[in-house]
Image (spheres, coloured by chain):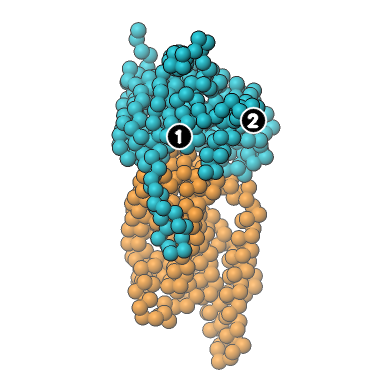
Chain colours: A orange, B cyan
Amino acid sequence: MSSLMHQGRASYAFFERNWNLAKRYLGWEIVWLCYNFINALSITFISKNTQILGHVTQAQVNYLTLYLVIGTSVWTYLSVTFEGVTDVITFERWEGTIEYTFMAPISRLTHLVGSCWYAVAHGLAFTFVQLLIVAAFFHLDLSHANYLTAIFMLLLGSVSFVGFGIGASVLPLLFTERGSQMSYIVRSVLLLISGVYYPINVLPGWMQPAARISPATYVLNGLRAGLQQNAPIWSPTIWASTWPLLISGVISIPLGLWVFGLAERYAKRTGRLKRNG
Amino acid sequence: MAIPDIEATDLTWNIAIDPAKDAVVIDDVSKVFKKRRSWLPWGKKEQEREVRAVEHVNMIIRRREIVGILGANGSGKSTLIRILSTLLIPDSGRVSIFGYDVRKDERTVQRLINRVSVEASFFKKLSPMENLIYAARLYNMPGREAREKIRQILTRLGIPKDRIGQPLEDMSRGMQQKVAIARAFLTSPIVLLLDEPTTGLDPRSKLDVQTFVRQLREDHDATILITTHDMDEAEALCDRVAIIDQGKIVAEGTIEELRRAVTERLGRTNPVTMNEVFMHYTVAHLISEADIARYGSWEKAFEAFEALKEEE
């Protein structure tokens, strides 16, 4: 019981620490929020362009607008969450606190889960604010939206995003100088293959199998079905996205932790936990 | 004489500690770092090389002892501390804390130890209170109890009350180091590892820290391993010292024993100082009288010599 309490306290320590850091780095938060919503706006305006090109109905434009808004929102959510998870290592290395965290008497699961649940909450808050701002610029047709399905898909997808994030946070652990930049590659591949702004069937045939192992593909499919077609959680359409996410979540978190454990042992053998590598 | 039990805390309540056991046992520990050549054709044209950071080190530290490891920069002091802190895995040998192996019983060992490094490593935008409450929660301390204890320790270490909530980046290096010391004391470790804890502190702050280290031993039965190249500090604090040079322990004993041995070896009638003992056993003997005259003191000459060695 006491051990559970200890791990609970430690997990909360990461949440509280990250929240305190966000307050102190408020300027950064505002910069990122601006960057994300401007990015989201610039992509969503593409739907207006299709209207100018002609041969499309207003309903089709509205459909495309919502399609792109969902894409930009999921992308923001995935980016912020993913960054929060990979920052578990990057930020601590930058501040020089990494050795203190790694010598604390807590399990790695507690360490990573503690950091991840803040990342998920942060990502959700960020995405919600961005959605509010973008919605002010466009007419979003939400007459067929099932919000319960949307929340369900986002939370279910978070589990897999966290697993992928834990796996990617190994890069800054192993590569002291360039690991953080390397984790951007993982993100950019997810952006390319997951159908964020286009359906995956427009990708070349050899890329499409990769799209099917990305959890973002299923989150987007499920969200679009929920928000554009009013698909309830128990519908076959949503189930088609749910079961791959369940499998992905069940595999990616233990796999991420296992890979992290291997990387930690390697770092402890080679002295890579040291502040500056 | 009966050996009193070690007081259990929220962190150590279910760890069986035999107070009669040696606190720290370092058994034939070696660590080599390998610097690999870049595999890129345009990478640095460095030769692949090995650095023998620690070589066949043996040491036993008894419970409640304060033991100093004296050595120049790059002599292997910090590597040894990192191995004890579970942050480095030795290539060979075994290290145990109260019988618990630092590799096999890593989590148990982590509950028994804490460490202060030469750099005060913190989230610099956060205040001392925010940093320490984070550390306290990791070490299973409830928030309210931790806040009270943090204020007590910081006040005892001379941190003004109005600075406890201010960002650490606005504090002097000395103050930051005191907060780092407070972080280690906060968890009342059974074994405390201090890696040059007073480097960069003014003389008054050094004395504050030394007093606090002694109190930690008296109040919490702590065993303390301290690395330093401040001979005055070693004399003031340590029951025993070991001198490490190029990864090897070259001398070990009480301050008096080492001074007597070197005095006899040099054939002097007046007892030698600890600086002379250190110089005798390490490469620091390269510091000449002319260097001391040039830099103003032995310590300053040593620092200049170290800086030069690091540059090389």
Tag count: 2
Kindly indicate the quadrant of the structure image that contains residue B303: top right
Determine if residue B132 is in view.
Answer: no
Residue B177 point in image, percent of width and height: 58, 33
Image position, residue B222 (x, y; %): 44, 21
Q: Which one is in front, A221 or B262?
A: B262
**Which numbered disc flags the more N-terminal residue, 1 or 2?**
1
Give the residue drawn at x 61%, y 56%: A29
Asked whether B218 or B267 is in front, the reply is B267
Residue B182, by quadrant, is: top right
Q: Secondary structure at mark 1?
A: loop
- List the residue tagged with mark 2: B295
User: Dot 1 corresponds to which residue?
Assistant: B75
Q: Chain of mark 1?
A: B
Q: Residue at x 41, y 79 (%)?
A: A203
Q: Amino acid at mark 2?
A: Tyr
1 or 2: mark nearer the eye: 2
Chain identity of mark 2: B
Within-10-Å neighbours for mark 2: few <14, some 14–19, many 20+: some
Name the element at disc 2: helix
